[in-house]
Amino acid sequence: MQDRTYTADAEPGDHVTVAGWVHEVRDLGGIAFLILRDSAGRIQVKFEKDEMDEELVETGLGVSRESVVSVTGAVEEEPRAPTGVEVTPEGMEVVAPADPELPLDPSGKVDADLSTRLDNRTLDLRKDEVQAVFEVRAEILRAARETFRDLNCTEINTPKIVATGTEGGTELFPITYFGEEAFMNQSPQLFKQLIAGSNVERVFEIGPIFRAEEHNTPRHLNEATSIDFEGAFCDESDAMDVAEAVVRSAYEAVAENCTEELEALDLADDFEVPEEEFPRLTYEETIERINATGELDDQLVWGDDLPTEGEKALGEDVGSHYFITDWPSEIKPFYIQDHDDDEQLSTGFDLMHPTMELVSGGKREHRYEQLVDGFEQQGLDPEQFDYYTKMFRYGMPPHAGFGLGGERLVMTILGLENIREAVLFPRDRQRLSP
Ligand code: ATP
Ligand code: MG
């Protein structure tokens, strides 16, 4: 729109056209105020009934909430107005009227449940605290990109329609691809490795992953955003360093660049950037510490996967982000390398927020024979993965990497209760539209 001024830029003495949504109309009798809202903020528009053109006053007071309007007039200082200025209108146009009955109240005075909010995201995002989540999410992804670039990584984009899954099996969504069965990719794992093995060496990708997980939890989606890293000549410790740098930079960026958003979310006072280095616990230490909390009915033994209550108890005990390293090989994927001196021990690691898993990673199996054996042991047909294993015969350097859940990062940074709040249009068991 030509010559439009954002509400936040309107200064006393200016003559402006502001455009946005009708936040509310307050009729005080002889005088009435219309609060106009745009992406930058809000501004008060003053109607003096006896002194202004009748038609203009009628338009201003008759317009329904959430209608889109444009108002032209002079900006004056007004200390009692929410932003210290107000517009005295000369002209007003209702650009797009809103039905008087709204399915959701963007002023937030009436609470809506998550399902109603997700069904009406356009209206939901007109609330400051909801817009703030997505401004923060954008900043987190920007910071992640910047950190990867600083660490010499190249951003890549790999296919989401694939012939075979990463680990095969149950978590795949099948689709029909020109009459043939194909799948939505559950992870860029194999592709990012293929590129780390080229001259590009260090890569990252921020893109969707699809998991046909049946369970419905507050931290699982069926379509999520994965922040992936893979680096040639890296070992698991290098990959952990990168994961830690990305997570820390996300907190720093939010603290530095999202002050208004944190305020809208009521987090400004106690938002903390993790300062200390994230401790690295071995799996063995982890199960001992979980057992010592006494929170579990059954003591964990070597080889057990960590139950959610165990993760929670340990998270409270540790009180910060932490890594779990040296997992039993049998509970980590086959493409992760075992330690040279102990093949029961995997180089796989997880990075944990006190409340949940954020990252899984490890050093990859780059030796052709071992890799093909791994496919067979997993019950997968290596022939089907020939496009992948073949490249391991032509000079595949040692390499390591990780996958970091983008929504889990946003969720844990902002303390959101449900991962769906960190996604515009979540995909879960119940939700396929909008
Ligand atoms: P979990 O055990 O929590 O289900 P996972 O170990 O199956 O996760 P990975 O395959 O290790 O997940 O994926 C790497 C990261 O991607 C996870 O640590 C998590 O942050 C994120 N992630 C994986 N699956 C999902 C999902 N269904 N919804 C949201 N994020 C996910
Ligand atoms: Mg994992």
Image: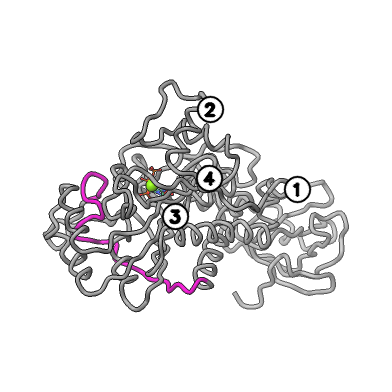
SS type, badge 3: strand
Q: Quadrant of residue 101?
A: top right
In 3D space, how far apart are the residues under numbered discs 4 and 3 (Cα atoms)?
12 Å
x then y, percent, for residue 356: 48, 41
Magenta run includes residue 41: no
x then y, percent, for residue 73: 76, 69
Task: Kindly identify which residue carries mark 1.
Answer: 26
Tell me which label, 1 or 3, sits earlier in the chain: 1
Would you call the spot at circle 1 few (<14 residues within 10 Å), some (14-19), or many (20 or more)?
few
| Residue 172 vs residue 231, the one in the foreground | 231
Task: Kindly identify which residue carries mark 2.
Answer: 293
Would you call the spot at circle 4 few (<14 residues within 10 Å), some (14-19), or many (20 or more)?
many
As shown in the figure, which amino acid type bears the numbered disc 2?
Thr
- Tell me which residue sits at (37%, 69%) in the image: 232
Magenta run includes residue 155: yes
As shown in the figure, which amino acid type bears the numbered disc 1?
Arg
- Kindly indicate whether the residue at mark 2 contacts the one at mark 3 (C-beta within 8 angstroms): no
x then y, percent, for residue 254: 63, 58
Tell me which label, 2 or 1, sits earlier in the chain: 1
In 3D space, how far apart are the residues under numbered discs 3 and 2 (Cα atoms)?
27 Å
**Mark 3 or 2, closer to the camera:** 2
x then y, percent, for residue 219: 45, 42
Tell me which label, 2 or 4, sits earlier in the chain: 2
Disc 3 Cβ-to-ligand 1 distance below 8 Å = yes
Apparent side of residue 216 relative to residue 291 in the rendered image (left or right):
left
Say which mark, if any, is on residue 404.
3
**Mark 4 or 1, closer to the camera:** 4
Tell me which label, 4 or 3, sits earlier in the chain: 4
Q: How is the image coloured?
A: one colour
Please give the range of residues in magenta: 151-173
What secondary structure is the magenta-colored segment mainly? loop
Pick out the residue farthest to the front. Answer: 341
